[in-house]
Image (cartoon, rainbow, N blue to C red):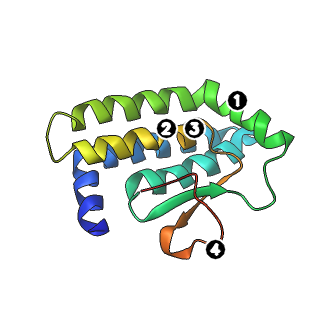
Amino acid sequence: MRTLLNIIWLVTGGIWLALGYVLFGIVACVFIVTIPAGVASFRMARYAFWPFGRAVVERPGGSGVMSGVSNVVWFLVAGLWLAVGHVSTAAAQFVTIVGIPLAIANLKMIPVTCFPFGKQIVDSDQLPPGVRPLHSL
């Protein structure tokens, strides 16, 4: 079922979302100071490309002050615009009955889109015991 949902996701907008993350990742890597944002963007591109069967959890060791500062900068520079992309894609997916679960999943991705630092994306099957995901698709 995950594979079928991922294929439908890919066709109904996942590829464009992933390309948006890749584009920002390339731009961020051009400037040396923003390479960590570029790496986070590439990580999110993989998640936006094939999201079902993955979960978002807090990074072990927590998030420090640098993660908080990075999240604020990320939100202002890219997170807000990528979240708008998720909302517009979700609106288009809501038009069809098949797309409604995909649109809901798209909206669930917005918190990690806006604030990716201090979070980790793992396969749902490989969640450590006792770890509760922030959200899972």
Q: Residues within 10 Å of mark 2 (few under 14, many from 20)?
A: some
The one nearer the camera, 20 or 131, is 131
| Residue 91 percent coordinates (x, y) | 27, 30
The residue sitting at 14% across, 43% down in the picture is: 97
86 left or right of 26?
left
| Disc on res. 27 | 3
The one nearer the camera, 108 or 73, is 108
Amino acid type, label 3: Val
The one nearer the camera, 91 or 129, is 129
Comparing labels 4 and 2, the label whose residue is closer to the camera:
4
Determine which residue is flagged by label 4. Answer: 128
Q: CA distance from mark 1 to mark 4?
A: 30 Å
Residue 96: quarter of image: top left
Q: Are marks 3 and 2 in contact (CB under 8 Å)?
A: no
Q: CA distance from mark 3 to mark 1?
A: 15 Å
SS at mark 4 in the image: loop
Determine which residue is flagged by label 2. Answer: 110
Comparing labels 3 and 1, the label whose residue is closer to the camera:
1
Determine which residue is flagged by label 1. Answer: 73
Reading the chain from its start, which is encountered first: label 1 or label 2?
Answer: 1
Question: Looking at the image, is 83 positioned above or below residue 64?
Answer: above
The residue sitting at 23% across, 65% down in the picture is: 4
